[in-house]
C-alpha cells in the first residue's frame, strides 16, 4: 500500500478576500499603472488589525517611528497583562508602559484612548456603524489620535473600501515613484491625484504600501509581529511622519 501523504498545510500567506480580488480589476481599469506593482512586487498580502481598542492603541504605537521600532514596542506592550483592555491598561503603572517603550506623551495618549473606551465615548460596535467621516471625527477627537490614525483604523480594522490616508509619507513616496514624479506630492495634491480611484482607494493605498515595501526593502509593522492573541482579531503616521508602509 502506498504511503498516505501528510495532510495539506494551510497556506500561511494572507490572501485578499474575494471582494478585494474583484476590486483589483476595477482599480486596474481606473489606473493601469497599478498593474506594474503586482508584476514586480508579487501578490498583495492582506493585512488586518483588531477592531476596537487594540487596533487604535497600535496606531498610537506606530506614530512617528519606524515599522521595526514600532513592532518591537507593540510586541512588548501587548505582552503586558491587561494592556489590550482599556480598563486594565488604566491600572498599569507608567513605569510598566514606559518599560514597554512608550514615550511619556504616548503613555498619556494611550491612557486617553483607554479612558474614552472605558467611558463609552468610543465603542467598537458604534464606530462600525458610523459613516467614514463620522468615524474619523470621533476617533480624531481623542487626545493623541488624528486623521491618519483614524483612517488607518478604518482601512485595516474596519476594512472600509474607500479610505486613503493622504497624510502618509510612504504613500506619497510610493505614488511619486510609480508615476515618475520629481518629488513627493503634498497631502492635498495626493488626495486630488487619487480622487479618480473612488470607490477603491483603500485598495490603492494597500498596493502603494506594497510597492514601497518592495522598492525600499522595508518590512511592514506586521511582518515583525509574533503570534497574536485574537481578542478580536496593520501604520504610517500622522501628517508629516515618516513611514514605511503598513
Image: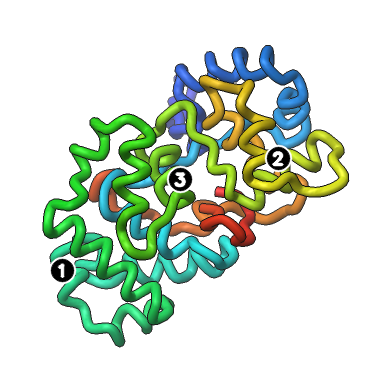
Q: Kindly report the distance in space between the C-alpha atoms of the residues bearing marks 1 and 3.
A: 24 Å
Q: Earlier in the sequence, mark 1 or mark 3?
A: 1
The residue closer to the viewer here, 190 or 160, is 190
Around disc 3, counting alpha carbons within 10 Å, would you say few (fewer than 14), some (14 to 19), or many (20 or more)? Answer: many
Quadrant location of residue 180?
A: top right
Around disc 1, counting alpha carbons within 10 Å, would you say few (fewer than 14), some (14 to 19), or many (20 or more)? Answer: few
Which structural element holds mark 2?
A: helix
Which structural element holds mark 3?
A: helix
Which structural element holds mark 1?
A: helix
Left or right: 187, with 161 as reference point = right
Residue position for label 2: 211
Residue 69 rendering spot, x and y as whole percentages = 54, 69
Around disc 2, counting alpha carbons within 10 Å, would you say few (fewer than 14), some (14 to 19), or many (20 or more)? Answer: many
Outermost residue on the bottom side: it is: 95
The residue at the point 59 percent across, 36 percent down is 205
Q: Earlier in the sequence, mark 2 or mark 3?
A: 3
Query: Residue 152 got which mark?
Result: 3
The residue closer to the viewer here, 21 or 108, is 108
The residue closer to the viewer here, 216 or 223, is 216
Residue 10 rendering spot, x and y as whole percentages = 44, 33
Q: Mark 2, mark 3: which one is toward the viewer?
A: 3
Left or right: 145, with 242 as reference point = left
The residue at the point 28 percent across, 83 percent down is 94
Query: Residue 88 got which mark?
Result: 1
The residue at the point 46 percent across, 18 percent down is 18
Question: Looking at the picture, does residue 204 appear above or below residue 1?
Answer: below
**Contact between labelled residues 2 and 1, with CB atoms less than 8 Å apart:** no
Q: Kindly report the distance in space between the C-alpha atoms of the residues bearing marks 2 and 3.
A: 18 Å
Amino acid at each position: 500500500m502506498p504511503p498516505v501523504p501528510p495532510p495539506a498545510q494551510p497556506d500561511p500567506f494572507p490572501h485578499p478576500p474575494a471582494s478585494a480580488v474583484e476590486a483589483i480589476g476595477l482599480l486596474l481599469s481606473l489606473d493601469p499603472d497599478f498593474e506594474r506593482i503586482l508584476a514586480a512586487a508579487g501578490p498583495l498580502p492582506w493585512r488586518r488589525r483588531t477592531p476596537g481598542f487594540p487596533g487604535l492603541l497600535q496606531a498610537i504605537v506606530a506614530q512617528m517611528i519606524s515599522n521595526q521600532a514600532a513592532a518591537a514596542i507593540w510586541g512588548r506592550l501587548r505582552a503586558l497583562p491587561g494592556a489590550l483592555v482599556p480598563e486594565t491598561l488604566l491600572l498599569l503603572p507608567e513605569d510598566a508602559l514606559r518599560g514597554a517603550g512608550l514615550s511619556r506623551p504616548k503613555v498619556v495618549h494611550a491612557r486617553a484612548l483607554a479612558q474614552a473606551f472605558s467611558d463609552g465615548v468610543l465603542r467598537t460596535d458604534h464606530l462600525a456603524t458610523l459613516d467614514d467621516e463620522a468615524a474619523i471625527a470621533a476617533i480624531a477627537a481623542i487626545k493623541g489620535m488624528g486623521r491618519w490614525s483614524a483612517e488607518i483604523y478604518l482601512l485595516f480594522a474596519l476594512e472600509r473600501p474607500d479610505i486613503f490616508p493622504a497624510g502618509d509619507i510612504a504613500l506619497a513616496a510610493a505614488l511619486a515613484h510609480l508615476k515618475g514624479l520629481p518629488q513627493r506630492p503634498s497631502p492635498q495634491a495626493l488626495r486630488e491625484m487619487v480622487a479618480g480611484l473612488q470607490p477603491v482607494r483603500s485598495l490603492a493605498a494597500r498596493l502603494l504600501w506594497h510597492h514601497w515595501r518592495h522598492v525600499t526593502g522595508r518590512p511592514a509593522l506586521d511582518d515583525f509581529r509574533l503570534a497574536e492573541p485574537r481578542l478580536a482579531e496593520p501604520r504610517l503616521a500622522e501628517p508629516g511622519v515618516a513611514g514605511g508602509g503598513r
